[in-house]
Image (tube, rainbow, N blue to C red):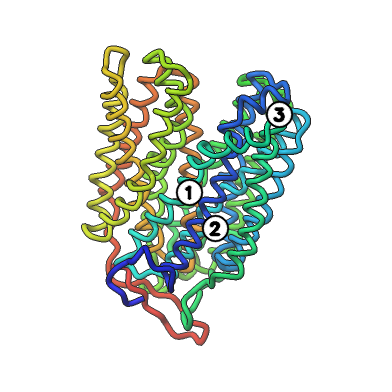
């Protein structure tokens, strides 16, 4: 832990844990997006209507929002080793279910359940934070996030070839099932090759499970406010499936889901009150407090960064195709380049945070992505194609480097709550994607990019309230003594 340099060519100690963990994350995204490059073959095989295909895309992200919250809690309570291993094993089952689907209903159930594996990202954030000191944490988390995120691009590159190798109308089934086999196999490998902490270190757990701990009355109110957009996003997804959208759900079912979401929010708020009752009656000593506003600001920033990435990756091939009259293959290749930037951009965002400060790095990157999307809103058919692609790539650098910078801060807020904080922040990325894609369904491409730029500017304004992590955070050891963990 004392090394000043991060040798990525090593497979020992903390670097070994980093490599094993980003591969686990890579596999979750590889499985989560196993449908995307095979969608035309799946639609033909199951005789799906265009509305049903759109429904599968919506269902693919629906469960990920609550799943990231739940997985964050489980990670903090039971440790990343067990949680990631079980997530990979359980997440493999919907892969097999989807591969065996004979009709739309079966495919829809499999796609909905597969959203659960998309929560894997949260687990590794806690694992990496346990192994790396603050001075290297941004870089390590950036590598973890950037290289793991490439799993979606790897699926797009390899799975069509796998389907062709097996051949026939069922080639896509073998390709999808293969992702499940890989996830199941790696769950065993991961469990037997990692530990939650370095030897001799303590794994700090939350006092209670079921809701995030806060340390003041004001923070409790802010927590309840920040939960609202997540439920609103689920309501928005329901609306898309209702008669007002793609008409998959009958109106009565949609109303029932709306009522259930209101009830769930009330129960969630009640549970948070139970978790924090003691704190609200008697605030803890200053050394044990943390500021939830830091979490809220990071949520907004991830809404604009990862939320926009998910949305843009979904629409960019079509945008290039319609704007420049390109064939689908060429447009898809150009659009996929946006996601390829993750390999470099996200690690650089973390590295810049380590070198130049968390807050200053975020300010520059968020302002850059706002300007980047403003530039993309001006792309028209009169532009040279190379210039349009260059504008998209430049924008993607700021977007993905911003994601790396966000998660360079997440583990430095409160160690025992890192999984829950990462889960909430990660969920906000999916909330952002739902919001932006809804805007796209109602407005032009230009308006879509301008809305993203505007929300990025809101995030930039919120950054003015963010505090640079400094000093130490305190956690209580099993014997009652206090351990101080450097955050700068």
| Residue 264 or residue 385, whichever sits in front | 385
Residue at image coords 54%, 70%: 194
Badge 2 element: helix
| Closer to the eye: label 1 or 3 | 3
Residue holding disc 3: 168
| Closer to the eye: label 3 or 2 | 3
Q: Which sits earlier in the primary sequence, circle 1 or circle 2? A: 2
Horizontal and vertical percent for residue 376?
31, 25
Task: Tell me: 396 left or right of 245.
Answer: left
Q: Which sits earlier in the primary sequence, circle 3 or circle 2? A: 2
| Residue 68 or residue 472, whichever sits in front | 68
Residue holding disc 2: 72
Contact, mark 1 vs mark 2 (Cβ under 8 Å): yes
Calculate the distance from the C-alpha at mark 1 to the C-alpha at mark 2: 10 Å
Badge 3 element: loop
Contact, mark 3 vs mark 2 (Cβ under 8 Å): no
Query: In the rendering, which numbered label is found on residue 426?
Result: 1
Can residue 77 be seen here? The reply is: no
- Quadrant in which the C terminus is drawn: bottom left
Horizontal and vertical percent for residue 14?
42, 70
State which quadrant residue 392 falls in. Answer: top left
Calculate the distance from the C-alpha at mark 3 to the C-alpha at mark 2: 41 Å
Query: In the rendering, which numbered label is found on residue 197?
Result: none
Horizontal and vertical percent for residue 478?
52, 83
Can residue 33 be seen here? The reply is: yes
Q: Is residue 41 above or below residue 19?
A: above
- Number of on-image labels: 3
Task: Tell me: 376 left or right of 101.
Answer: left
């Amino acid at each position: 832990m004392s090394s000043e340099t991060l040798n990525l060519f090593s497979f020992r100690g903390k670097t070994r844990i980093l490599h094993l963990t980003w591969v686990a994350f890579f596999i979750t995204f590889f499985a989560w997006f196993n449908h995307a490059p095979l969608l035309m073959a799946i639609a033909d095989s199951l005789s799906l209507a265009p509305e049903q295909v759109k429904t599968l895309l919506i269902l693919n992200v629906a469960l990920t929002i609550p799943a990231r919250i739940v997985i964050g809690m489980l990670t903090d309570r039971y440790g990343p080793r067990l949680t990631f291993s079980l997530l990979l094993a359980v997440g493999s089952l919907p892969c097999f279910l989807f591969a065996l689907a004979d009709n739309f209903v079966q495919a829809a159930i499999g796609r909905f359940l597969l959203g659960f594996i998309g929560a894997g990202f949260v687990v590794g954030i806690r694992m990496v934070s346990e192994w790396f000191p603050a001075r290297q944490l941004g870089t390590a988390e950036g590598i973890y996030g950037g290289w793991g995120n490439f799993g979606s691009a790897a699926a797009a590159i390899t799975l069509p070839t796998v389907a062709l190798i097996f051949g026939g109308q069922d080639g896509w089934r073998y390709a999808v099932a293969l992702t499940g086999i890989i996830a199941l196999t790696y769950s065993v490998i991961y469990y037997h090759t990692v530990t939650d902490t370095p030897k001799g270190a303590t794994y700090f757990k939350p006092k209670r499970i079921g809701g995030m701990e806060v340390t003041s009355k004001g923070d409790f109110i802010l927590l309840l406010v920040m939960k609202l957009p997540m439920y609103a996003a689920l309501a928005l997804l329901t609306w898309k499936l209702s008669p007002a959208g793609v008409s998959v759900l009958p109106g009565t079912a949609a109303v029932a889901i709306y009522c259930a979401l209101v009830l769930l929010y009330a129960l969630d708020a009640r549970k948070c009150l139970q978790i924090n009752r003691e704190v609200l009656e008697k605030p803890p000593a200053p050394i044990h407090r943390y500021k939830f506003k830091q979490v809220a600001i990071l949520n907004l920033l991830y809404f604009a960064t990862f939320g926009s990435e998910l949305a843009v990756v979904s629409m960019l091939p079509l945008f290039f195709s319609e704007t420049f009259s390109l064939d689908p293959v060429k447009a898809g290749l150009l659009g996929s380049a946006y996601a390829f930037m993750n390999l470099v951009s996200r690690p650089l965002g973390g590295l810049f945070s380590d070198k130049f400060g968390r807050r200053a790095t975020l300010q520059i990157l968020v302002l850059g992505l706002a300007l980047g999307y403003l530039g993309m809103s001006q792309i028209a058919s009169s532009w040279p194609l190379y210039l349009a692609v260059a504008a998209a790539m430049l924008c993607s650098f700021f977007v993905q480097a911003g994601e790396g910078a966000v998660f360079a801060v997440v583990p430095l807020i409160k160690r025992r709550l890192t999984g829950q904080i990462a889960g909430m922040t990660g969920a906000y990325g999916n909330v952002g994607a739902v919001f932006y894609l809804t805007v796209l369904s109602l407005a032009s491409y230009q308006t879509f990019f301008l809305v993203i730029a505007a929300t990025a500017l809101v995030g930039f304004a919120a950054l003015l309230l963010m505090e640079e992590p400094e000093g130490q955070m305190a956690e209580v050891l099993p014997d009652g003594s206090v351990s101080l963990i450097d955050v700068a």
